[in-house]
Image (spheres, rainbow, N blue to C red):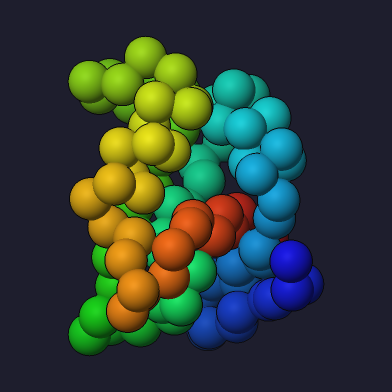
Amino acid sequence: MKNLVFREKEMTLQRITRVKAKKAYEDGKEVLFIPVNCNPLSKYFNLGIWENKNLEGQYNSFESLCNAFEFYNCNSETGKYIAFYIKQ
């Protein structure tokens, strides 16, 4: 995994591993799910979603959310797996 940090005027995003993302998700922190080849700060082509455990959705666990996100959003153009980011 590359240690990537994206900075914009009002926000700094740091890439984290899947294990750290699961822990942050379980702790109620917001985690950005995005395909690996996409820029998380892009205003034109952004497939990312912010998720945390407190949001009431149709997925009961972190793993089921990851599986559904990969199935619908990850492909050969956007990347075959998910990159996770948190706000600094």
What quarter of the picture does the C terminus occupy?
bottom right
What quarter of the picture does the N terminus occupy?
bottom right
**Of the pair 32 and 61, the residue shown nearer to us:** 61
Identify the residue at image location x=68%, y=30%: 23
Give left or right: position of 72 versus 23.
left
Q: Which residue lies furthest to the top in this view?
A: 60
Q: In this view, does 58 lie above or below 18?
A: above
Give left or right: position of 14 versus 75.
right
Residue 40 seen by the camera: no
Give left or right: position of 53 versus 4.
left
The x, y position of residue 30, in whole percent, is 50, 42
**Of the pair 58 and 71, the residue shown nearer to us:** 71
Total labels: the figure holds 0
**Of the pair 48 and 8, the residue shown nearer to us:** 48
Residue 18 seen by the camera: yes
Q: Is residue 44 above or below residue 46?
A: below
Q: In this view, does 20 lie above or below 53?
A: below
Identify the residue at image location x=68%, y=76%: 5
Residue 75: name its quadrant: bottom left
The x, y position of residue 11, in whole percent, is 54, 71
Identify the residue at image location x=39%, y=36%: 67
The x, y position of residue 20, in whole percent, is 72, 40
The x, y position of residue 60, in whole percent, is 37, 14
